[in-house]
Image (cartoon, helix red, strand yellow):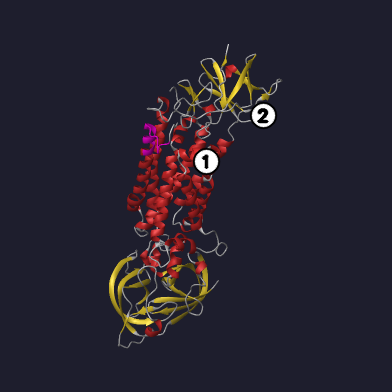
């Protein structure tokens, strides 16, 4: 939560996350460039610069796969939500590793020539259609530019400035970036790979992501709430179905999802979208008397959807009624921060 | 905080999630290095050992060696330096530049040239330290020996990287680099998938014996089949190939 912008609000979880991530990345690069060659066929060695290019490129691909796997994993099993918490740092590290890969290519394949490296990079491949396949270098350049845009906006300043829906839409560009990276490898290194290791890695990672995303997409969605005789109220289900400290997510016909929380025998309804990053509040909990987002821990008061002072985020609230043990919801959102007395259960 | 609900800003993670977090940490902290070791151990030059193997030579590109040589400059798709005894080298400057020499003035003349030699299998390149110096000595060079017309499958590459300046010096991943080398005047070579008269590398020119580029620029780095006359010039083969 933020009352003011700071570069990074560090917490023990972030320190641990980044430490493990960096240990993995440096361990990968060290193993690839220093230990791997010791096991190579001595008759077919790579030179050091080519090895570094391959190491950083493949590392960026694996990190990108990991970043894309975390979302569906967390949707399928909430125990993976901690991996989502600091995913932006993973994204920024991915970009930096990919940038290192690009700089190494520029300094090796596109250096030592009268042609400036950047010009050489964009002018040495056959034009589209002039040779079989696709020119793989521009595919990688495009992916890197997308990763740069995403890394540069991986801060709450940009999230607030762009608004969560626009920011999230922008960051969905990670998917075309991944497709470009797969094409970059498929039309590049894989064309002359000396063994199947890289092909297995790329197809395995891409297949894993497809399976995870399909499984998450086909997860049962909340059923649409039935209209009540008294419009605009809709039936949100039995009050007993809402566990203490938790919520049910209700999908009103034609409206936004609403999260109905139960806390100390009272019900409160707010939008299901967190004001921070549109996280699914209904999958959160009531902690210290506040609705707590499962993604980044942003908190809101139950009665008015406002973040506790000094924080300023606000949620839309909704009216509730109880009729014969059934919760009725007025699906028209109140302006964010509007106080609605919690519904006291008998 | 209670149960298994994780809050990132909390001082400690919930006890129920510690096993999952430890597993994820180990997967990243140890799994990534393991993957790096596997890929690093299998990252190999796509050229099989046969490309570098000639009788009496190790199966690897030789380390560059300083040499001062005397020989005759021969014309062709790119200038060649043929030494007495038949040893024949392709020529280049440092970096991605072709040899700096006056071809018209030096054609057929004995010269002194020095630099470092790249050698891989049947190909040798002299990377010139300075332009060759013409000598007054007279030398006769046997004419090239025609070996007939050949249809050869392989890859167009630059003579410097294929000769061992880079490993890998062939393959699609190296295509842009090879194109830049050839644009800069480095001699083109054809890397055959199977040896031709004992040679895996052939100096490549067009059907008339002129330079392969720019006509064959879009074919660089791909497996292609070319047809044309093959000549033996000293201990090097020259391939006068037509566009497919």
Residue B104 showing in the rendered view:
yes
Q: Which mark is residue A162?
A: 1
Measured along the vertical axis of the image, is residue A337 above or below residue A215? above
Can marks 1 and 2 be said to lie on one chain? yes
Identify which residue, B10 or B141, lies in the foreground: B10
Label 2 Cα neighbours within 10 Å, binned few <14 / some 14-19 / many ≥20: some
C-alpha gap between disc 1 and disc 2: 28 Å
- For disc 1, the neighbor class at 10 Å (few under 14, some 14 to 19, many from 20) is some
Location of the N terminus of chain A by quadrant is top left
SS type, badge 1: helix
Q: Is residue A287 left or right of residue B72?
A: right
Q: Picture quarter containing residue A111?
A: bottom left
Chain letter for mark 1: A
Give the number of the disc on residue A312: none
- The image quadrant of residue B177 is bottom left
Q: Looking at this view, is A310 or A209 the one in front?
A: A310
Please give the residue where the numbered disc 2 appears in the rendered image.
A253
Determine whether label 1 and label 2 are within 8 Å by CB. no
Q: Quadrant of the C terminus of chain A?
A: top right
Q: Nearer the viewer, residue A263 or A335?
A: A335
Magenta residues span A5-18
The residue that appears at 59% across and 35% down in the rendered structure is A218
In percent of width and height, residue B166 lies at 38, 63
Q: Residue A158, position in %: x, y?
A: 48, 41
Per the image, is A14 magenta?
A: yes
User: Foreground residue, B108 or A90?
Assistant: A90
């Amino acid at each position: 939560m933020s009352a003011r912008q700071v570069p990074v609000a560090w917490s023990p979880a972030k320190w641990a996350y980044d430490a493990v991530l960096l240990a993995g990345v440096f361990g990968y690069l060290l193993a690839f460039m220093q230990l791997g060659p010791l096991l190579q066929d001595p008759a077919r060695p790579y030179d050091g610069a080519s090895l570094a290019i391959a190491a950083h490129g493949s590392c960026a691909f694996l990190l990108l796969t990991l970043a894309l796997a975390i979302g569906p994993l967390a949707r399928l099993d909430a125990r993976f939500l901690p991996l989502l918490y600091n995913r932006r740092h993973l994204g920024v590290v991915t970009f930096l590793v990919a940038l290192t890969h690009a700089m190494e290519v520029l300094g090796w394949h596109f250096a030592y020539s009268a042609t400036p490296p950047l010009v050489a990079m964009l002018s040495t491949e056959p034009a589209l259609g002039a040779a079989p396949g696709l020119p793989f270098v521009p595919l990688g350049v495009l992916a890197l530019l997308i990763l740069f845009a995403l890394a540069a906006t991986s801060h709450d300043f940009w999230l607030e400035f762009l608004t969560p829906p626009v920011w999230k839409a922008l960051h969905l560009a990670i998917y075309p970036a991944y497709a470009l990276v797969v094409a970059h490898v498929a039309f590049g290194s894989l064309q002359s790979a000396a063994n199947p290791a890289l092909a297995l890695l790329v197809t395995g990672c891409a297949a894993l992501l497809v399976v995870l995303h399909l499984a998450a997409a086909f997860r049962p969605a909340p059923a649409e709430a039935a209209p009540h005789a008294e419009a605009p109220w809709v039936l949100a289900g039995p009050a007993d179905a809402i566990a203490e400290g938790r919520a049910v997510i209700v999908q009103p016909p034609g409206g936004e999802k609403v999260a109905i929380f139960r806390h100390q025998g009272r019900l409160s309804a707010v939008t299901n979208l967190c004001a921070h990053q549109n996280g699914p509040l209904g999958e959160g909990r009531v902690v210290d008397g506040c609705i707590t987002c499962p993604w980044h821990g942003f908190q809101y008061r139950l009665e008015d959807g406002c973040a506790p002072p000094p924080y300023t985020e606000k949620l839309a609230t909704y009216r509730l009624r109880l009729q014969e043990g059934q919760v009725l919801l007025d699906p028209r959102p109140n302006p964010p921060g509007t106080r609605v007395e919690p519904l006291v259960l008998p | 905080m209670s149960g298994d609900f994780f809050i990132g800003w909390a001082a400690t993670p919930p006890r129920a999630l510690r096993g999952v977090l430890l597993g994820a940490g180990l997967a990243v902290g140890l799994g990534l290095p393991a993957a790096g070791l596997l890929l690093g151990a299998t990252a190999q030059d796509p050229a099989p050992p046969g490309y570098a193997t000639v009788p009496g030579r190790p199966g690897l590109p030789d380390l560059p060696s300083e040499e001062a040589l005397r020989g005759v400059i021969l014309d062709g798709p790119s200038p060649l330096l043929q030494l007495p005894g038949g040893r024949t080298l392709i020529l280049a400057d440092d970096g991605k530049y072709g040899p700096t020499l006056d071809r018209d003035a030096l054609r057929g003349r004995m010269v002194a040239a020095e630099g470092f030699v790249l050698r891989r299998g049947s190909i040798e390149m002299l990377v010139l330290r300075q332009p060759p110096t013409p000598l007054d000595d007279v030398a006769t060079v046997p004419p090239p020996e025609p070996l007939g017309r050949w249809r050869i499958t392989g890859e167009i590459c630059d003579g410097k990287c294929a000769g061992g300046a880079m490993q890998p010096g062939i393959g699609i991943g190296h295509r842009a680099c090879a194109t830049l080398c050839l644009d800069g005047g480095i001699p083109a070579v054809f890397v055959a998938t199977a040896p031709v008269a004992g040679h895996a590398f052939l100096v490549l020119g067009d059907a008339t014996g002129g330079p392969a580029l720019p006509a064959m620029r879009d074919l660089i780095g791909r497996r292609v089949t070319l047809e044309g006359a093959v000549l033996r010039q000293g201990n090097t083969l020259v391939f006068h190939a037509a566009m497919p």
